[in-house]
Amino acid sequence: MLVKTYGSAVYGVDAITITVEVNISQGIKFFLVGLPDNAVKESHQRIAAALKNNGYKIPGKEITINMAPADIRKEGSAYDLTIAMGILAASEQVSQPHLTEEYVIMGEMSLDGELRPIKGALPIAIKAQKEGFKGVILPASNAKEAAIVEGLDVYGASNIKEVIDFFNGVSTMEKVVFDIQKEFENYDDISGVDFADVKGQENVKRALEIAAAGGHNAIMIGPPGSGKTMLSKRISTILPPLTMDEALETTKIHSVAGLLGGNVGLITQRPFRSPHHTISDVALVGGGSNPKPGEISLAHNGILFLDELPEFKRQVIEVLRQPLEDRVVTISRAKISVDYPSSFMLIASMNPSPSGDFYDPSGNSGDPEHIVKRYLAKISGPLMDRIDLHIEVQPVPYDKLAEKKDGETSAEIRARVVAARKIQEQRFKEVPGIHCNAQLSPKLVKVHCQINEAGEALMKNAMEKLGLSARSYARIFKVARTIADLEASPNIEPHHIAEAIQYRSLDRDGWLG
């Protein structure tokens, strides 16, 4: 008897439906074809033990299993349940074998039949819904994320016996329902940090507010203990909440990476990723022999924080250049090419010198000028070109630290950021792929960042007297546009330009003093 069951293979952040054809005829052989890897081939032993321990068996006949399309490599142990149900249906050990063709069935099995979680349940469910399947049957710990997809029956099973009972018509499994709207309404910031905790540093807070309002990349430079890391960890608390589309996209990536817990159906908080400086380029960007998302994709729609930027390997930080520009990273291998979205805010911090002190021309403290220059040169010009704000962070004096009064809360700053983002959303509603000022192309800068004669004169004066590089020009306009949005000003005024110029420290000629 020939029976078809269906599973899915995940490539990038999308799924491809895999048809598992099981044919049982006279003989005593077992064939598994269709380009399976070792983990899939080993499913024979797991399935045999699991079925035996639950009162079923693999029939002693010739069993041929084909996994189509045969030109796509099938990897991992998530096909255990798909193959097992195909064998049971083809050997008529379930009373309604025809129902197996209406569902996508996925799950790894232990030897006692327990179902273990798989990766990529959300893209699998999305693909099943698009291809018209009635529903999906997955391990119970994956059911909540799959239930996000509307128009699909989602069942979560903890053991293969529950799945067998389902196809025998005696199931106790209930559909898993997920209320997306309720999830968003119950949104709560669980980070436990707030800008009110930070004493002083009002100029830095202002710069980070501008970065959040326009989606700008920023780098903070200052000595150890000045609060760079503390400030960076609080940026996510002032970003606008995720939209529905952003939440689904972010959840999809974390689902593929296997980072969703059993009780998490939808990610409602913007990601904050902070990899150590010993990270490899593959771990940062993604890839490997079996490609998976890297840190920059896990930070999609959120923040990638690189602490002590010059300590990262040069090769590692240089691979950020293309994703920062294109907001997508393409991983190409001999047999496959996958795209991972990587639209993130880069927030970096660094010391001004190896010793951690600013350059002191008097020579009383800090490192010599040539040492400082060599240290700063670890960050290449093309990478610095993609960072809009350069923020100098000075140590907080004792008087500020001892103040009893708290500063502005994250909620207060966030309200201004959200208002500015709404202005940008209205401005770019007719422009596909543009959501904030940081994404403006040179052509759109000319359209949306026009300045008056006084602003032109100020810009010319700054470029000539401060020795600003050509790459600073467009960045200053983008940041000025965001500052104007924070004031709800339709035009960019000279004082907006003046403030934006202050955030190009590392481009200034003679910045070291």
Image (cartoon, rainbow, N blue to C red):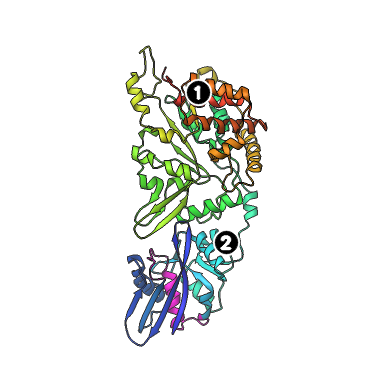
Q: Which residues are magenta?
A: 69-97
Q: Secondary structure at mark 1?
A: helix
Coordinates of residue 177 in the picture (x, y in percent): 61, 62
Residue corresponding to mark 2? 147
Q: Secondary structure at mark 2?
A: loop
Q: Earlier in the sequence, mark 1 or mark 2?
A: 2
State if disc 2 and disc 1 touch (CB < 8 Å): no
Q: Residue at 43% of width from left, 85% of height from top?
A: 1
Is residue 382 magenta-colored?
no
- Near mark 2 (Cα within 10 A), the count class, few <14, some 14-19 or many ≥20, is many
Q: Residue at 63% of width from left, 43% of height from top?
A: 425
Depth check: 155 or 312 in front? Answer: 312
Q: Is residue 67 left or right of residue 462?
A: left
Residue corresponding to mark 1? 463
* Residue type pointed to by label 1: Met
Is residue 91 magenta-colored?
yes
Coordinates of residue 117 in the picture (x, y in percent): 46, 61
Q: Residue at 61% of width from left, 51% of height from top?
A: 244
Q: Is residue 260 visible?
A: no
Q: Is residue 28 left or right of residue 112?
A: left
Image quadrant containing the C terminus: top left
* Residue type pointed to by label 2: Ala
Depth check: 456 or 203 in front? Answer: 456
Coordinates of residue 9 in the picture (x, y in percent): 44, 64
- The disc placed on residue 292 is none
Q: CA distance from mark 1 to mark 2?
A: 55 Å
Q: Is residue 448 visible?
A: yes
Coordinates of residue 499 in the picture (x, y in percent): 57, 24
Task: Name the image quarter holding residue 18.
Answer: bottom left
